[in-house]
Amino acid sequence: MRSESLEFLQTLVETPSPSGYEQPAAKVFREYVTDFADEVETNVMGSVHAMLRGSGDGPSVMLAGHIDEIGFMVTYVTDDGFCAFKEIGGHDPQILPGMRVTLHTLEGPLRGVLGRLPVHLLEEEERKQVVKTHKMFIDLGMSGEEVKKRVRIGDPATYAVGFEPFGEGMAVSRAFDDKMGAWVIAETLRLVKDAGGARGDLVAAATVQEEVGLRGGITSAYGVNPDVGIAVDVGHATDYPDVDKRKHGEAKIGAGPVISRGANINPKVFELLVQTAEDEGIAYQTEGAPRGTGTDANAIQLARGGKAAGLVSVPLRYMHTPTEVLSLEDLENTAKLLAAFVRRLDSSIDFTP
């Protein structure tokens, strides 16, 4: 991976952006794509649309990768300065006690700890149960008076961990879901630009609030109004212990992007993605999605009178934890696949099933 792209990936995933608070990550995305987009705009929801104008004789395409991450929100502060919180997006409550977090305030970030009673002080029955969120709190190590000066109700928090390469071409970080998707669509835009552009307009849409209801995807798909829309998101890798492939299918890290097929996916888009991967010699995997996919592809497919929708996923281990794991090569290959797909589209293609 080229150094500028790797730096962009690390900066993007480490920049805090819980759902509803995506502005810092949106700024990082805007600054990166400005060098190769013809037009960059931010809509009232906060989603960023970077456009590369086409020659005019091909379908318009929107690629969507959401820039929001899961996190926490302060809902109450005790007189002693301990902050009650609620979850933004879905978390595994079993991993929360003892985690370090960063609380993002108007005056700047504060280090916090997710506290609860230690196991020694729990009743026997309590030790067998998963702790409830309302039984935890954020400890900022400050007096109640100081906390109430600096913390406002509604301030967000994120896990206090960042990006780190490890193993054989792997990386670990919080928030790969789905800021790695925003990275992929930005890189796709760059690759298409470097290759001479496409026949139709291409919009890379860094969408907001996916984790709380696909809200940015809904508004971007309506506003951009593309002919074709592809969501880029993470998918569950099933290549580690205790995953039942009969229930969850097979997806391996390092084996390439996963192309979805099913009710949420336009059949022609699926076949063209597969054909592109095979023609370009890009390793790929497929998954069956019999219903909605729970991604921005849902929003794209149902926009206005309906759109030709697709979903390309990157296999991810340990989704919605502070230690999400993926292959950097899978990221690069996803961008290469999408760039080649966009460049081969022309006005002769009919996406009607």
Image (tube, rainbow, N blue to C red):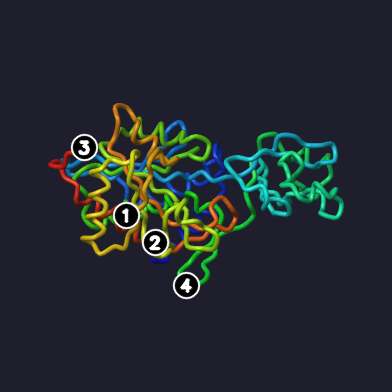
Q: Residues within 10 Å of mark 1 (few under 14, many from 20)?
A: many
Residue denoted by label 1: 190
**Mark 3 or 2: the one toward you:** 3
Say whether disc 3 or disc 1 marks the residue closer to the N-terminus.
1
Identify the mark nearer the N-term, 1 or 2. 1
Amino acid carrying mark 4 in the image: Glu
Looking at marks 1 and 4 on the same chain, the residue that comes earlier in the sequence is marked by 4
Within-10-Å neighbours for mark 2: few <14, some 14–19, many 20+:
many
Residue 305: give x, y in percent of width and height: 29, 27
Amino acid type for the residue under numbered disc 2 = Asp
Location of mark 3 (residue): 353
Determine the image quadrant of residue 39. Answer: top left
Gap in angstroms between the C-alphas marked 3 and 4: 42 Å
Location of residue 29 in the rendering, given as x and y in whole percent from the top left corner: 44, 48
- For the residue labelled by badge 2, is the local secondary structure a helix, a strand or a loop? helix
What residue sits right under mark 2 in the picture? 330
Closer to us: 102 or 108: 102
- CA separation in Å, label 3 and label 2: 30 Å
Dot 1: element: helix
Residue at position x 54%, y 64% in the image? 164
SS state under label 3: loop
Query: Residue type at mark 3?
Result: Pro
Tag 4 or tag 2, which sits nearer the N-term?
Answer: 4
Real-space CA distance between mark 3 and mark 1, rounded to the nearest whole angstrom: 31 Å
The quarter of the picture where residue 20 lies is top right
- Name the residue rendered at 37%, 51% in the picture: 287
Measured in 3D between alpha carbons, the distance from the residue under mark 1 to the one under mark 4, in whole angstroms, is 26 Å
Residue designated by label 4 = 168
Furthest toward the top, the residue is 305
Q: Earlier in the sequence, mark 3 or mark 4?
A: 4
User: Would residue 346 appear left or right of 256 to someone viewing this image?
Assistant: left
